Image: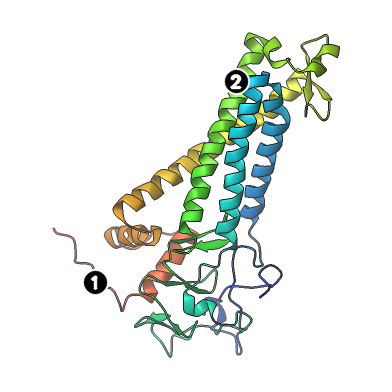
């Protein structure tokens, strides 16, 4: 099965196809490499590339010899581990076992509410046409039933379910640790420049540089001379990017640790929140809309929530 080149699209919502005489039929997406790719993927990979270039090409080569090799080893191991688990979270097909046994090249029908009330009824998906597990949900973005559905992640362009959840979790955790390494290294270099810049100029290549206003980047292989403001702006910009990313990923990791402690999924959390708060106001996020759709699919299989006490 070709996992990378197939152009796959989502199911059209019923409201969009109700006026068409013969609505098009669409394919299920296999994983995060299935087309169309999401712009957030490009943002994630660009950020990873920029951080790698700045840290391994600029910041670490400026450290004293002993700390240089320690920084290379620790930061390199964290970045490599993150790359592996991130790729795994993207590449793994999170679909239900019965769905994975089917031919993904077969077009998926558009859901017809005149024939069925919900997509999944009595643990049977009328779109995937297979029996599914109790915790499976049909994702409209991936156009298939996902085992142990947690949420659809735009950064992975893939659903997160029981088959790839721990890869997703380790990806978030390792990214947070990697960003912590980035912040520590860049802060050290920037502060040391103003305190004692000679500690950043221990590489033999600096023997030919007589002024402290010139930095050499990409040592030891290349000697790219730049002025101090240029180097500081580059590292300052990456430090700002790393700080923002650290805060956002930290919030996400704490949220998922909370879910693990409570033995809940993201879907369970949002479903419970919606049942408590009632109807959503206008301007709902895509994640909430996807969860709302999944909730509608399982209304026949979950008991109604009791009304709040007066």
Determine whether the residue tagged by mark 2 lies in a helix, strand or loop. Answer: helix
With 190 as the anchor, is 146 left or right in this view? left
The quarter of the picture where the C terminus appears is bottom left
Q: Which mark is residue 304?
A: 1
Image spot of residue 119 (x, y percent): 43, 80
Q: Can you say whether 254 is above or below 189 in the image?
A: below
Eye-nearest disc, 2 or 1? 2
Residue 84 visible, this angle: yes
Residue 33 image offset from top left, x and y in percent: 64, 63
Which residue matches tag 2? 188
Quadrant of the rendering where the N terminus is positioned: bottom right
Crowding at mark 1 (Cα within 10 Å: few <14, some 14-19, many 20+): few
Tell me the CA gap for discs 2 and 1. Answer: 56 Å
Q: Identify the element where label 1 is drawn.
A: loop
- Badge 2 crowding class, 10 Å Cα cut-off, few under 14, some 14 to 19, many 20 or more, is some
Can you say whether 205 is above or below 210 in the image?
A: below
- Indicate the position of residue 12 as horizontal and vertical percent values: 56, 76
Q: Are marks 2 and 1 in contact (CB under 8 Å)?
A: no
Query: As drawn, is 55 to the left or to the right of 283?
Result: right
Q: Colour scheme of this structure image?
A: rainbow
Residue reaching furthest to the right: 208
- Which numbered marker is on residue 238? none
Q: Do we see residue 118 in this rendering?
A: no
* Residue farthest to the left, as pictured: 310
Image x and y of residue 121, in percent: 37, 82
Residue placed most toward the observer, 4 or 203 = 203
């Amino acid at each position: 099965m070709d996992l990378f080149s197939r152009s796959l699209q989502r199911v059209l919502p019923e409201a969009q196809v109700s006026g068409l005489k013969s609505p098009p039929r669409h394919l299920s997406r296999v994983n995060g490499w299935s087309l169309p790719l999401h712009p957030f993927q490009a943002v994630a990979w660009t950020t990873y590339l920029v951080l790698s270039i700045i840290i391994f090409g600029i910041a670490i080569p400026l450290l004293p010899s002993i700390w240089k090799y320690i920084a290379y080893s620790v930061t390199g191991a964290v970045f490599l581990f993150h790359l592996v688990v991130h790729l795994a979270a993207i590449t793994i097909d999170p679909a239900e076992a019965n769905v994975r046994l089917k031919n993904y090249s077969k077009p998926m029908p558009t859901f017809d509410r005149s024939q069925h009330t919900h997509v999944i009824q009595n643990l049977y998906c009328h779109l995937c046409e297979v029996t599914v597990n109790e915790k499976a949900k049909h994702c409209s973005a991936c156009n298939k039933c996902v085992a142990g559905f947690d949420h659809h992640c735009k950064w992975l362009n893939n659903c997160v379910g029981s088959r790839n959840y721990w890869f997703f979790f380790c990806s978030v955790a390792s990214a947070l640790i990697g960003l912590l390494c980035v912040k520590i290294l860049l802060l050290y270099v920037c502060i040391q420049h103003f305190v004692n810049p000679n500690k950043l100029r221990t590489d033999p290549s600096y023997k030919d540089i007589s002024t402290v206003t010139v930095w050499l980047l990409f040592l030891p292989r290349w000697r790219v001379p730049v002025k101090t403001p240029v180097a500081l702006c580059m590292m300052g910009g990456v430090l700002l990017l790393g700080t923002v990313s650290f805060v956002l990923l930290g919030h996400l990791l704490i949220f998922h640790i909370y879910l693990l402690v409570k033995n809940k999924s993201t879907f369970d959390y949002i479903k419970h929140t919606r049942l408590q708060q009632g109807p959503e106001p206008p301007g709902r996020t895509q994640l909430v809309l996807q969860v709302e759709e999944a909730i509608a699919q399982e209304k026949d299989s979950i008991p109604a929530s009791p009304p709040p006490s007066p």
